[in-house]
Image (cartoon, rainbow, N blue to C red):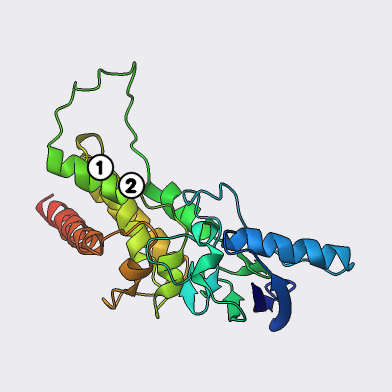
Amino acid sequence: MKLTLKIWKQKNNSSAGKFETYSVEADEHMSFLEMLDVLNQSLLEQKKEPVVFEHDCREGICGSCSMVINGQPHGPNKGTTACQLHMRYFKDGQTITIEPWRAKAFPIVKDLVVDRSAFDRIIQAGGYISVNTGQAQDGNAIPIEKGLASEAMDAATCIGCGACVAACPNASAMLFTSAKVSHLGLMPQGEIEHTKRVQSMVTQMDSEGFGNCSNVGVCEAECPKGISIENIARMNRQYIGSVFGSQTKVEKA
């Protein structure tokens, strides 16, 4: 199949970028990233600069392949990362537009690569449990309600790709942050310090320059792992409770 690609090219974050047009022949059984590999191989053979894009596992679990394909983060298939998107979902002769995530908090490194280290700093702010565990306990030493365990595991499937930010008209990171808050705060081991955690992570999220959530819901629709916006509601409740709870304690003191 012959395709026309309009790809965003930008030297670095401080330079101006533009779309450049390429032609490529791909097999319908290729993944989207394999198609870009074919394009880059052709460009290298022509002594031209290849298109820079990020990838790692190519199995849909690392979140590295962050790109907007025809206006949709990770492309047209629901619940699919760009590396798991296959060319059979496109038509022969089709024009495909490819660009990076668009968000102030995700500065462009080059071409389709953006710096998503803001997510790392949010996790560092509170995405851990600060307890001395000693030796490993037996698997069933701490009883955990099945419903809570399932909710925590659902939130933990977030791969931190940033599609929620790219899809949101406000470039909000609420879905990502709330998933990290939920998957630790719902478990008995993490519940102890959940008030401190939610405040730290929300404060860091705001300082990174992400926008506010206005309940559009497109973040959930575009998330390749189907993270629910119920996590956002839970995080808001926990944050408000932690702020007013701490104020109450100060007043009583």
From the viewer's side, name the closer residue of 76 and 188. 76
Whether residue 35 sits left or right of residue 243 in the image: it is: right
Of mark 2 and mark 1, the one earlier in the sequence is 2
Residue at image coords 33%, 25%: 132
Q: What percent of the width, then of the height, locates residue 2?
A: 67, 75
**Residue at mark 1:** 193
SS for dot 2: helix
Q: Can see residue 186?
A: no
Q: Are marks 2 and 1 in contact (CB under 8 Å)?
A: no
SS for dot 1: loop
Residue at image coords 59%, 75%: 99
Q: Is residue 211 above or below residue 200?
A: below
Q: Can see residue 96?
A: yes
Q: What percent of the width, then of the height, locates residue 157?
A: 35, 49
Quarter in which the N terminus is drawn? bottom right
Q: What percent of the width, then of the height, locates residue 36?
A: 67, 64
Q: Tag 2: residue type?
A: Ala
Q: What percent of the width, then of the height, locates residue 227?
A: 30, 58
Whether residue 36 sits left or right of residue 238 in the image: it is: right
Q: Tag 1: residue type?
A: Glu
Residue 237's disc number: none
For label 2, count other residues whose C-alpha is less than 10 Å away and answer few (under 14), some (14-19) or many (20+).
Answer: some
Q: How far apart are the alpha carbons under marks 2 and 1?
A: 18 Å
**Residue at mark 2:** 156
Q: How many marks?
A: 2
